Amino acid sequence: MITIRNLRKTYQMGKVEVRALDGISLSVKQGEYVAITGASGSGKSTLMHILGLLDVPDDGTFEIDGTDVTKFSENELAAFRNRVMGFVFQQFNLLKRTSALENAALPLIYARNGRRQDVAREKLELVGLGNRMSHHTNELSGGQQQRVAIARALVNHPSIIFADEPTGNLDSKSAKEIMQVMSELHAQGLTIILVTHDSDVANHAQRIIEIRDGKILSDTPNPDAPKVPENVPSKNSSKVRKTSVFQSLREGEVLLRQSLRSLLSNKVRTALSALGIMIGVAAVIAVVALATGAKKSIEDQLSQLGTNLLMLMPERRMSGGVRQASGSVSRLEEEDTKAIREQVPHVSYASSTVSGNAQLKAGNKNWNCRVEGVDPEYEIMRSNQPQLGRFFTEAEMRNRSRVCVLGLTPVKELFGGANPVGQQVKINRQTFTVIGVLPEKGSSGFRDYDDTAIIPSTTAMRRLFGKTYVDRIEIQVDESDNLEQAQKDILALMAHRHRTGTRENPFDIRDMTEIQETVSSTGDVLSILLSGIASIALVVGGIGIMNIMLVSVTERTREIGLRKALGARGQDIMMQFLIEALIISFFGGFLGVLLGVAASLITEKTSGLEVLITQNSIILAFVFSAVIGIVFGIWPARKAARLNPIEALRYE
Ligand code: ADP
Ligand code: MG
């Protein structure tokens, strides 16, 4: 069954070479019970590890049933260990905080053949632990623990059992029981290869091989071997069945449960590493919600101010570094407004605007606010249809009538919010009649758009502010595509009307749409910047997870070695650690979403700022935490997956 020839293994210890195996040749037939003995350090364990496919020789040939196993890939070796071999170690190597049943069932996870707990139960009964299935390993005696390990070795119906000093850590009574179990297994047709330095133990075997310094000293049949019944050739029931979707689901479930258990066994550590992700996700969600909300409220206000608007004003010239007063060079006149309205194509409306601050007085109440003198067209241009009363007419404008339309803030301050239409109000000591109330425009934080009073531009110029010129002209163009052309035409018209000749045009025209776009793109930049800062928290959280996973890999090196010895492939180990990292980051991400949403809502309630939690930011946060889990989990997971089983098992 097993044939090895000229096997060599040399360990390099700094400058010293240790020849653990020095040209070993032997063959073992199916159903044999072989003991390998020798003094400590003679190379017994090394030989057993190579025979058990846990380690590879430097040189020599190794065939199992005629197959050259030295050419096997890692995964093939793992599958072979899992299905054909069972291992019993001196240190039992059971998983802590895990029941006997789950320990015995461990190789089944990596067998992928659908057989489950019932086989593990059956094998535990076989070794006499039928009444200890749910006991945790720390609740079992040494002998019982070793019997769990034997049940584990048997669970995949192997054809060979390897046992390395199985009684080394046991009292003589337990040792006897274990050797009894071994003999029974042999009687059932299993091939057993037992490593021991104890000749009493070796005497249980039919054949004793003694090695010294990596060489075979003697290989003799044992006449004292206890009589066993005729060998029944073991039926090899370890064929790999096809995995169905159902089985993959069950495997997934087992993996998930395993990861959850290991995370739960370190609750504080898990919670702390999830905390980093939680804070990061919460910060991203809250910041994006705030930035989106702020941007939306600014955009809403800007769009209320009217669309396709241009503003024409005298250019403020710099002269010798001193900014001259507005309009000191050229001044706009009412006639300019008229000309623009009538002569420039695509212009829908135009309004002269004169503004200044004034004191309003009604009864015994005073209020200072901005007074705008405009043309009647301003009502449509700026969507200023009064919510109460009416706007002023062409006739009132021609007559320089003392009429005004008040914004909500002066109405509140002067009339306590009561309907002021028809009432008198004094503006800079001149009596005006209130004819309407403006619609609500809101405030943008730095400016209250409702704190205004609107009067005819003629009245403002000639009666209120004593000006003969207008401050600026607001123009509405029919379509946004025509904005550029209209700007050129207006500037040309102004140059012509003011006879600037070859001098630089003294007027400046601004596109309000551009201002809107600037504001909203500033909002975008701001929100990207802020979420960038917030995602630093996420990255820090991810590094926290990586750190914890690396610690966990180191701490569980022996466990990883055991799992690999029992047939876990590199990708199984990798999966286990990745799933753990993912669970931490999803858990953190989920709490982070809750915290982020709560923080946003609380901010909205307490500060009155508008917040907007978008579905996208939540999806983004989740995707981000998954990515973090994978990215920062991969390194530790790969580190774990690459461990050599025997070195990992020996790790202290
Ligand atoms: P035994 O099991 O017979 O006591 P081993 O097979 O464990 O002996 O070891 C054989 C020799 O190889 C010993 O001299 C031991 O020190 C050496 N050896 C075993 N494993 C290693 C290792 N990983 N690195 C270096 N030397 C080792
Ligand atoms: Mg040893």
Image (tube, grey):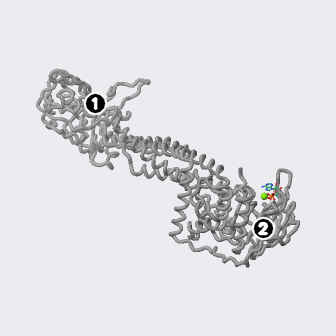
Identify the residue under disc 1: 471
Q: In the image shown, does 534 or 370 lie closer to the viewer? A: 534
State which quadrant residue 78 falls in. Answer: bottom right
Quadrant containing ligand 2 reads bottom right
Q: As drawn, is 10 to the left or to the right of 239?
A: right
Q: Is mark 2 within 8 Å of ligand 2?
A: no
Residue visible at 75% across and 62% down? 49
The relative height of residue 105 versus residue 354 in the rendered view (above or below) is below
Q: Amino acid type of disc 1?
A: Asp
Q: Amino acid type of disc 2?
A: His
Real-space Cα separation, disc 1 to disc 2, in angstroms: 113 Å
Which class describes the residues within 10 Å of circle 1: few (<14), some (14-19), or many (20+)? many
Please indicate, yes or no, whether residue 362 appears anywhere in the rendered image. yes
Residue 554: x %, y % from top left: 66, 50
Residue visible at 11% across and 31% down? 422
Q: Looking at the rendered structure, which numbered label has been put on residue 204?
A: 2
Q: In the image shown, does 286 or 198 lie closer to the viewer? A: 198
Q: As drawn, is 370 to the left or to the right of 590?
A: left
Residue 222: x %, y % from top left: 83, 71
